[in-house]
Amino acid sequence: MSAPIRIGIAGYGNLGRGVEAAIAKNADMELVGIYTRRNPSDLVPLNAGAPVFSMDDLGGHGDHVDVLILCGGSKSDLPQQGPELAALFNTVDSFDTHARIPEHFAAVDAPALANKKTALISAGWDPGMFSINRVYGEALLPDGETYTFWGRGLSQGHSDAIRRVAGVSGGVQYTIPSEAAIEEVRSGSRPVLTTRQKHTRECFVVLANGASEDAVRAEIVGMEHYFDQYDTTVNFITADELARDHAAMPHGGFVIRSGNTTDEHAQVIEYSLALESNPEFTSSVLVAYARAVHRMSQAGQFGAKTVFDVAPGLLSPKSAAELRAELL
Amino acid sequence: MSAPIRIGIAGYGNLGRGVEAAIAKNADMELVGIYTRRNPSDLVPLNAGAPVFSMDDLGGHGDHVDVLILCGGSKSDLPQQGPELAALFNTVDSFDTHARIPEHFAAVDAPALANKKTALISAGWDPGMFSINRVYGEALLPDGETYTFWGRGLSQGHSDAIRRVAGVSGGVQYTIPSEAAIEEVRSGSRPVLTTRQKHTRECFVVLANGASEDAVRAEIVGMEHYFDQYDTTVNFITADELARDHAAMPHGGFVIRSGNTTDEHAQVIEYSLALESNPEFTSSVLVAYARAVHRMSQAGQFGAKTVFDVAPGLLSPKSAAELRAELL
């Protein structure tokens, strides 16, 4: 067996912790550094032996790390770190602001190419595995429609939105796909579905002292863009119930392609995820793509890449010959 | 738009007909020839204008065809045609004898490399899309188990087997996955399932004159390897019922990866197909991979390839920039 792939983690929140856990599941990888903006001695990794450094040390660690996994947020961390660090390291990130992906790709591509680095952006499950299945679906059934359903799962963005409402002291939001809509899509009938028909939203809210249930409910269900196009249920609970019953971060969903190969024959392709931990699964995807990035870098394939550019076999620790014999 | 990709079809059974239908669904492709061992004037293509040639003309048509799709059978056609034609054309085949894939790969690789051709073997859905999902599943959840279920669908091999039984004048066999077993796998519990627990088999048989139902049933359900490890139901029907109710070729199935990212969190990935026409879907996969083969050939990536070697984006008629903007 060749030397292990040396992985670094830049940023240690839920995602960074998930990456640490995922590296431990991959025998061909080694965690060589967790990089944090906090004081390194304050950080408690899952494995007490994991080496922790300051983010400021990254500049001198280019030769010690084969692939650096960027575990910051898409809003402010990754737009800055992505281009900066792609000049120094092979990188993987989970940039998930769909509308700004072309811009992020270009910003990362230039420094990566100039410094002969491979930088894979927007890995995870959406963007990521769901995107791959949208591409496969369109290519295999060009005469068809693609449907994406999310959930049942906790939406971070919508949970943040309800916590900003006056009179709310805490809360979470679950996105729930409509079983009836999914069944209709699975039938091959290619229905036209409105936003309201595809998903409902369920909120669990802790009221601030003296706040009114009716006022808070009205503000949430009418919130533009986040809730007004959905049927939304608001449940009021105690702070203890919130902590006890809603600390997990489940998620998942469905990408369904329904199409016809001839007028006579409908065909349906379905990909689905049922995740008990959204961040841990995303981290696991990032780690598998780190293996591919290491190989693409060794093969001289530099610049920004996406999951669409990565052949499936590159994700596996098995050789091409092993994959053909065992899994084809 | 660049010149259309010129596709040839070698062999015109169910698969070849499906390829002709699939090419018509892809605006960037053109059917330049159907090649047959029959008398070309006897062949009736779906589109009356399709050019039909003798298989013997292939030798002189190397410059007219960008990718030749081999639509023969895995038992005798492809082992011979694959290596022969990979010396003359970029090719795609659906070789599906799992145990002999490494041998077929080697046999095709040498002539393809020697003649700077790209030859993709074993495309379709199993081997093919199911295989890809087995690789993704293992790579994303290394601590886990992969489960494949087939059906509900008509199995050609098992239908052939029952038609060879003395006293049978016709019949078909359907493979039926166990809903209970699938639900158990979806739960994330990683059950150990026996062959008998995963699938049942259902036969519809037309008896020959004077044959005994009991004798035929006993012979079928006890048939080694094909039926003895399964719970098998045998229904006797008339020749008219067989023709009326069992002429379609539906199939499909499920690849499910169940794994843990940590001891606390199970994660389940599921890929499934519900196909009204097995051969038409397989053909549609072959055609999408023909696009990828054309591009890999243009990029100088010669030799034998499998679906594991093909980045998802290569299957799409859209550019990498379009895919990033629209589908990531």
Image: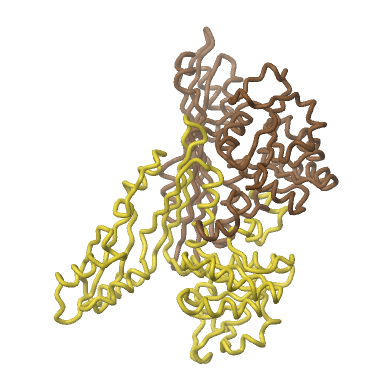
Chain colours: A yellow, B brown
Q: Splitting the image into 4 quarters, where does residue A171 fall?
A: bottom left
Q: Is residue A229 above or below residue B176?
A: below
Q: Give residue B284's position: percent from left, percent from top.
A: 58, 39
Q: Out of B237 and A261, give the one closest to the viewer.
A: A261
Q: Quadrant of residue A320?
A: bottom right
* Residue B259 x, y percent position in the rendering: 50, 60
Is B220 left or right of A310, judged from the image as shown?
left
Q: Residue at x 60, y 53 (%)?
A: B312
Reply above or below: A140 against A300: above
Q: Is residue B44 left or right of residue B80?
A: left
Residue drawn at x 61%, y 34% as measured from the top left: B19
Above or below, A82 relative to A58: above
The spot of residue B8 in percent (x, y) is 70, 34
Q: Residue at x 63, y 55 (%)?
A: B311
Q: Quadrant of residue B110?
A: top right
- Give percent across and percent down for residue A75: 45, 76
Q: Residue, x 69% and y 65% (percent of image)? A: A296
- Please indicate whether residue B285 sits to the left or right of residue B274 in the image: right
